[in-house]
Amino acid sequence: MSGRRLLIISGLSGAGKTIALHALEDAGYYSVDNLPVGILSSFVAYTAEQDLPHFHNVAVGIDARNHPDEISNLPARLDALQAQSFAVELIFVDASDETLLQRFSETRRKHPLSSENYSLANAISRERAILDPVIMRADVRIDTTHTNVHEFRTLIHDQITHRAVGALALEFRSFGFKNGVPRDTDFVFDLRCLPNPYWDPALRDLSGADPQVREFLDGAPMVSEMVADITSFLETWISRFEEGNRSYLTVAFGCTGGRHRSVYMAEKIAKRFEAAGKKAAISHRDAQFTVPEP
């Protein structure tokens, strides 16, 4: 299946699976939602047999409406497809239970597993349990708890559709510990020991992307030391993840509020890896601002 790509998109209802499929379709993928697991292999074989350009990149949505036994068998089916040289990636879209409850309440949509016997909260819990084998097998897990639709579509564009098959996609993320640690994170660096620009009234309302804050932090020897240590650590271990055929790696930087030190570090480290030829995305979970022109 040289030159072809198969993405399996799964996830919790309300987390953004359909948005991901629409974004992939806009990027030129042939997208099919709610495909029964039992016909996945024959569907993939059919697309591989067709000499049609629109079948070169295929995205398939699979959710908990399949029989639980079929969901449990999905990892084995994907392993079998990979053994046949199909380039397969499983992407799981997740969100916190509180966020899913809020989204369903706001849209007044019915959860596909809710019924007279299952409340919305119970349906979400049941769905998470059914999809657990998929979560464990996922190559990429995306948490949309703190992500709006525009940010999510951008992430799909930058990290999924524009990444070569087998290449490692990096995301560098800032956050504030006061709002909790992001769930879908591989490495977390705590920056709260660094000098805090917040206590300078002239810098308080700025962000780590502003030149005044960058100058403040660049001038602190402790900050330079941490930048060098983090860069060295990531250079060593990112290469190890690449050797292990990892598809996606998220590195998070946290400070107290997620506006100054964490934003500064995410931007600085990401630019270093971009300069080295890596595909790097930057996201700021808790900081709302416009990145100034360099």
Image (cartoon, grey):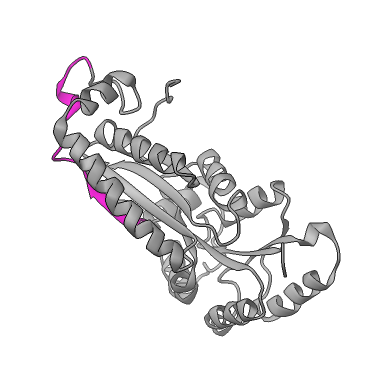
The foreground one among 35 and 122 is 35
Q: Is residue 131 above or below residue 94?
A: below
Q: Is residue 57 left or right of residue 124?
A: right
Q: Is residue 229 magenta?
A: no
The foreground one among 194 and 241 is 241
Residue at horizontal 35 percent and vertical 40 percent from the top? 269
Residue at horizontal 72 percent and vertical 62 percent from the top? 3
Residue at horizontal 49 percent and vertical 45 percent from the top? 277
Q: Is residue 198 magenta?
A: yes
The foreground one among 190 and 114 is 190
Q: Position of residue 271 (x, y in %)?
A: 41, 37
Quadrant where the N terminus sits is bottom right
Q: Quadrant of residue 42?
A: bottom right
Q: Which residues are magenta?
A: 183-202
Q: Is residue 201 above or below residue 64?
A: above
Q: Position of residue 100 (x, y in %)?
A: 44, 54
Q: Position of residue 73 (x, y in %)?
A: 56, 83
Residue at horizontal 59 percent and vertical 72 percent from the top? 65
Most distant residue in the right direction: 51
The foreground one among 100 and 164 is 164
Q: Is residue 53 left or right of residue 39?
A: right
Q: Name the dominant secondary structure of the magenta segment.
A: loop
Quadrant where the C terminus sits is top left
Could you tell me if residue 124 is visible in this image?
A: yes
Could you tell me if residue 195 is visible in this image?
A: no
Q: Is residue 22 above or below residue 3?
A: above
Q: Position of residue 287 (x, y in %)?
A: 35, 33
Q: Is residue 119 above or below residue 132?
A: above
Q: How many marks?
A: 0
Q: Quadrant of residue 259?
A: top left
